[in-house]
Amino acid sequence: MPKPKRLALEMALHEEQERRALEGELAQLERAWREAEEIAAIADNLLFIRTTLRAHFTLYFTNRTPCGMIPWQSHRTATPFIDKTSHHVIAADTPLTGPPPPEVPLTDPPLVRVIAQVRFPLIASVEKRDFIAPFQEAIREFYPVLRPEEEHSVVLGPRGVVDTTRSNTLWRFSEASGAWRVTLAPAFLALETTEYTSREDFMECLRLVLRALKEHVDPKVLDRIGVRYIDRVSGDNLSALPQLVRPEVAGILRSPLAASAQHAVSQSVFILPGNTGQITVRWGLLAPHSTIDPAALDPIDEPSWILDADASQSFQAGSWPLDVDSVVEQARGFAERIYSIFRWAVTDEFLRRYGGEP
């Protein structure tokens, strides 16, 4: 066979072989691509699971208090939380466990007062003006009005009043409108407001006054931390209360006796998981011109319904040194738990009545 024809035949045979090889490689590449896609999808799912678990464990291990841990649990799980300290089993869907629900802003909130307080062993020097002057300067930009008050204590014995001579000076610092107020006393510091805006805003205000307390008063240890939120329902919303709160909370006001009720207040005390504090919750009907606490809730001239939640933790003497960040985080945890109770107690209709969008 002539050399040119032989060369042409060899090229044709090689071209056919190369074509078949190329088709096989493409098929292999296609299979490899599909396998890669499947592996990538599995990896993405694993990444999602890993990220979710990391977030869950981060919440669990970072949501701490100096005297214990507040466990994280999802409201979606039915697994109960076992309090190993008290051996109580707490259902996972109660407001005492799990992360707080997202805040729903209310354009006309029923919140009438929010208070945060830290108590410490008596510091007698707080009675002196010269001693508290640096503290005043540290907060005077925000609380320019200072009005001292005298607090008188009465000691009762078997035959009545035994001693009425005890008194303390309370230094009341407030902004010009009086809506925000700081009280410094020989054994406590309190921050309160009647114009609450948000949890974060309140905690930053608390941080400010705690820094001034630590720098200029310097209590070495704390005896107690407390946070309190008081809501009040009155007017037309009071008549619609059975639709605004849970049946367990409405109580007798859902019965025919509601028309004759003048005063019906219930109180419950809940121990938080891990013995990280307790919450005292009072709710119920108040008659006109009445109150459950004159220092925190002003009487009004019409019937009203209140939801008063007070979270606190007390410490053994000298067990918790004053650390501003720790106190703020503890207070924030209490505020979140109180909000969880509030959202558990009220219905979506309640939120809508006060300008929220649940």
Image: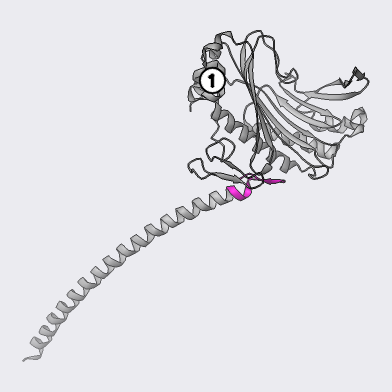
Percent from the top left, x then y, of residue 62? 63, 48
Percent from the top left, x then y, of residue 148? 86, 21
Q: Residue at x 54, y 49 (%)?
A: 56
Which residue is under mark 1?
Answer: 354
Q: Which residues are magenta?
A: 59-71
Per the image, label 1 sits on a secondary structure element best described as loop
Q: Nearer the viewer, residue 70 or 104?
A: 70
Q: Is residue 147 magenta?
A: no
Percent from the top left, x then y, of residue 269? 66, 31
Neighbor class of circle 1 (other Cα within 10 Å; few <14, some 14-19, many 20+) is some
Residue 72 appears in view: no
Q: Residue at x 10, y 90 (%)?
A: 3
Residue 30 appears in view: yes
Extreme-left residue of the structure: 1
Q: Nearer the viewer, residue 142 or 107?
A: 107
Amino acid under label 1?
Tyr
Name the quadrant containing residue 170.
top right
Name the quadrant containing residue 145.
top right
- Against 353, residue 119 (above or below) is below
Q: Is residue 66 magenta?
A: yes
Q: Residue at x 83, y 44 (%)?
A: 318
